[in-house]
Image (cartoon, grey):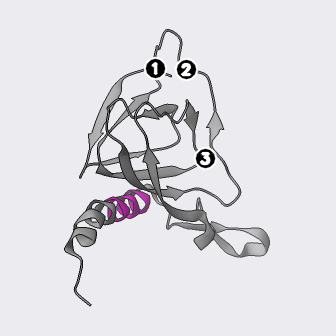
Amino acid sequence: MPHDLTTTRKLTPAAFVVLGVIAILLAAGVGRLTPGHAGVPTADVLRGPGDVAVVTQVYEPGQASGWHTHAGLHAVAVLAGELTVYDGECRPQRVVAGEPYVGGRELHLARNETAERVEMVVTYLNAVGTAPAHAGAPAGCPAR
């Protein structure tokens, strides 16, 4: 069976994002062990493989995530299109295909403001059982 180079090329940004997130976590000391219950060491943030999820997502034109935060981090690799991410100060950051975005704990909103669909791979690093916390838009911010 011939090798599909298109698939390999599309996944390259995602691989860079995953490696970047691992580097960030290591720099932040996630790998550091602390005493847990009965003196058994546990990681500061991630406690097992279930804490990591990798999903593909599509945002159609005009689709938005709503304002929210995460208990942990997420790394987004945009594979096609352009995603606009607003931070808690209502400042937009445009992320195009081939570029990563890392965020999570701070208030944010992701939206497709173009006429084309956005395809992305998202790696979530959250404790098992945590879900995004939805919130209202920052005062004076028109982004919804």
* Label number found at residue 137: 2
Q: Is residue 29 above or below residue 82?
A: below
Q: Residue drawn 25% across and 72% down?
A: 8
Q: Amino acid at mark 3?
A: Ala
Q: Amino acid at mark 1?
A: Ala
User: How far from the left and from the top, in percent, is residue 28?
Assistant: 44, 55
Q: Magenta residues, as a range?
A: 17-27
How far is disc 3 from disc 2 in space, using C-alphas? 18 Å
Q: Nearer the viewer, residue 79 or 87?
A: 79
For mark 3, what is the residue? 71
Does residue 24 show up magenta in the picture?
yes
Q: Amino acid at mark 2?
A: Ala
* Label number found at residue 65: none
User: How far from the left and from the top, in percent, is residue 113?
Assistant: 36, 29
For mark 1, what is the residue? 143
Q: Residue furthest right?
A: 38
Does residue 84 show up magenta in the picture?
no
- The reply to whether dot 2 and dot 1 touch (C-beta < 8 Å) is yes
Q: Quadrant of the N terminus?
A: bottom left
10 Å crowding of disc 1: few (<14), some (14-19), many (20+): some
Any part of residue 91 in sight:
yes
Q: Is residue 83 above or below residue 1?
A: above
Q: Residue furthest top?
A: 140
Q: Is 59 placed left or right of 125 in the picture?
A: left
Q: Nearer the viewer, residue 38 or 133?
A: 133
10 Å crowding of disc 3: few (<14), some (14-19), many (20+): some
Foreground disc of the pair 2, 1: 1
